[in-house]
Image (cartoon, helix red, strand yellow):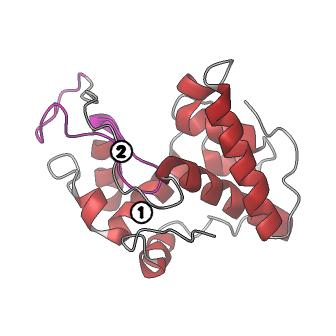
Amino acid sequence: MFPDRNSFYTYSGLVAALSSYPGFATTGSATVQKQEAAAFLANVDHETGGLVYVTEIDQSGDYCASESYGCPAGTYAYYGRGPLQISWNFNYEAAGNALGVDLLDNPGLVATDAAVSWETALWYWNTQSGPGSMTAHNAMVNGAGFGQTIEAINGSVECNGGNTAEMQDRVNDYESFASILGVSPGSNLTC
């Protein structure tokens, strides 16, 4: 599935992270379970260039939102990292709180600890709706479709006529992973 995978992204790191989210790819029918796995892998593939990039290529963005806790690691320290390229100080704060790890002060852990990296991706997938109206997990297990996973992850940029080429790349990845897993991709593939 990921022939050029960076060795940082270990299977053991993913398995360790999965224990924190037992509903992931185990909820619903066998079809729904495979569709969720394919959807997650497709978004991971898109975000990381096939599990090649651990950190965002362009790290010059200011992802420091005005929050009471600020950006103790530095204004430009909260760029994308990990399988879903978690970014913004508020996501590092919330993910760290959920995982029991201080990611606000040490966002680099997402790029140096494989289990933490996968945990942040699964945390976002299962608990955050981002610019969307539901989590990616809920989109897949409740029949809203793959398009809503895009909405949750990067909808403000790719959906509603935004960057349709990027959205289509995610859809193509999803159809490919669904085929590998032997499941129909279902409907509502775009956002």
**Image-based side of 107 in relation to 45, left or right:** left
Q: Nearer the viewer, residue 165 or 139?
A: 165
Q: Position of residue 57 (x, y in %)?
A: 35, 43
Q: Residue 56: which disc?
A: 2
Q: Residues within 10 Å of mark 2 (few under 14, many from 20)?
A: some
Residue on which disc 1 sits: 119
Q: Nearer the viewer, residue 146 or 130?
A: 146
Q: Position of residue 6 (x, y in %)?
A: 41, 68
Predominant SS along the magenta part: loop
Q: Is residue 118 magenta?
A: no
Q: What kind of residue is marked 1? A: Glu
Dot 1 lies on which element? helix
Extreme-front residue of the structure:
4
Q: What kind of residue is marked 2? A: Glu
The magenta segment is 66-91
**Image-based side of 6 in relation to 126, left or right:** left
Question: Could you tell me which residue is drawn at 14 percent across and 48 percent down?
Answer: 105
Residue 141 appears anywhere in the view: no
Q: Residue 67: which disc?
A: none
Q: Position of residue 16 (x, y in %)?
A: 43, 77
In this rendering, the answer to whether 86 lies above or below 177 is above
Q: Residues within 10 Å of mark 1 (few under 14, many from 20)?
A: many
Dot 2 lies on which element? loop
Residue 91 appears anywhere in the view: yes
Q: Position of residue 117 (x, y in %)?
A: 37, 62
Question: Could you tell me which residue is drawn at 85 percent across and 70 percent down?
Answer: 182
Quadrant in which the C terminus appears: top right
In this rendering, the answer to whether 128 lies above or below 181 is above
